[in-house]
Amino acid sequence: MTAICDLPAAELAARFSRGELSPVDLARACLERIDAAEAKLNAMYRLDREGALAAARAAEARWQRKAPLSPLDGVAVTIKENLYTRGDPSPIGTRANDDAPAQSVDAPPAARLREAGCVILGKTTMPDFGMLSSGLSSLHGVTRNPWRLDRNTSGSSSGAGAAGAAGYAPLHLGTDIGGSIRLPATHCGLFGLKPSLGRVPVYPPYIGRVTGPMTRDVAASAMLMNALSKPDARDFMSLPYDASDYAADLERIDLKALRIGYLAEMNFGLPVHAEVAAAARGAANALDAAGAKVEAMKPFLAPELLQGMEHFFEARSYQDFVQLSPEKQAKVLPFVAEWCTWRAKNFTGRDVMAAYHCYVALREATTRATVPYDFVVSPTSPILPYAAELPSPNDDPHNALPHIAFTVPYNMSEQPAASLNWTHSADGLPIGIQVIGRRFDDRGVLRLARALEQMRPAQRDWPALV
């Protein structure tokens, strides 16, 4: 029998509507799951038991009155630590901010979830400043992958990835500026959507930075997008509001009418693992067999562009780092401190502008390479989950980001991109594929991901930690 906290969001909503299940039942089941598994995973930064149960009781009363705030009323959710929630500090993963004050207001994504009636269980972990694709944090410690506790979740939405795979809740929110939703999604076996920049209002906004859903199935993320995409004037980079129902007609797609690019490798960064390559090829072959016109793409990410993006991120983080007192700087994870200072401390204004121009050039190169296609399919990460305690796959702060070559281009081009688990490695580790759409076509990415979800090989059972 499926545990309550493992039920899909759509089924939970249907059961709430029929009176067969209560949001209070769900909240209690989620809290019990967290209690049973958290000592092994370390996925939660803060847990609000009383607040969650109070919100669940309020949702229960609304369903009993046949007046839910939304289809997600009463469905439990976790939120990444760097997304502000009123009453909670947001130290951004680093011990340097262990004295961070409580936030007075919700950031837009948290506000939209409360308005939808979602039951916020608490906040999930992340690495220092969100600038590691890892579950390692000077403040939170090591967040572990439920599929194998000695493996990394990737990051920076590390806690959300672990919580999703372990069934802490049906819904999770992450953020992504270079792959931080999609990388933990692939390494934890989830579906994770990086929306088009501005589709989901955030605060504060920044180049390439988005908030998106991380769930076990595509439909749940589509339901979340209906709430998250509602407007908020605080995000001056947000798109005009599109009132489309992302969950409606999710299976409405004509594969035979699609031209799809298949990007097998970038020829830069880490080499693609053989089992990862086989998974991406399998997805492309499945689309071809279903009638789509699938064409091989040439790599478009030149080495100097990825290096320029690394310089851009280094300069951004160095600016944050040097504003800290020496006492606080000493609390930052040594890997991150070395990464953001060893080169950036000598950057000139010309160096910073050169890095910015690489961002512009990467955006142009990505758009030019993908515009001939309705969608692109590729690996999400070139590698399988690596050791849990490592801050990056190659443990080298002087070359910290070679594993984001498949993900970072679409942050800069502002295109929607998602990771969907396709299969598992020989030793049981998840392997995701990436689906990229044209700018603004978030619904199209969800629809193609749903089609692939139905085509993919049989999936393994979710890890049972208790």
Image: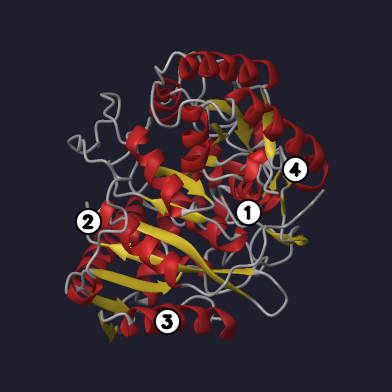
Q: Which numbered disc covers residue 265?
A: 3
In the shown orientation, is residue 105 left or right of residue 39? left
- Residue under pointer 1: 338
Q: CA distance from mark 1 to mark 2?
A: 35 Å
Q: Amino acid at mark 1?
A: Glu
Query: Of callouts 2 and 3, which one flags the residue occurring earlier in the amino acid sequence?
Result: 3
Q: Nearer the viewer, residue 307 or 362?
A: 362
Q: Answer with the quarter of the image where residue 255 lies.
A: bottom left
- Residue under pointer 4: 42
Q: Residues within 10 Å of mark 2 (few under 14, many from 20)?
A: some
- Residue under pointer 2: 439
Q: Nearer the viewer, residue 30 or 199?
A: 30
Residue 204 at x, y percent in the picture: 38, 31
Observer-side mark, 1 or 3, equals 3
Q: Amino acid at mark 2?
A: Arg
Q: Residue at x 66, y 33 (%)?
A: 96
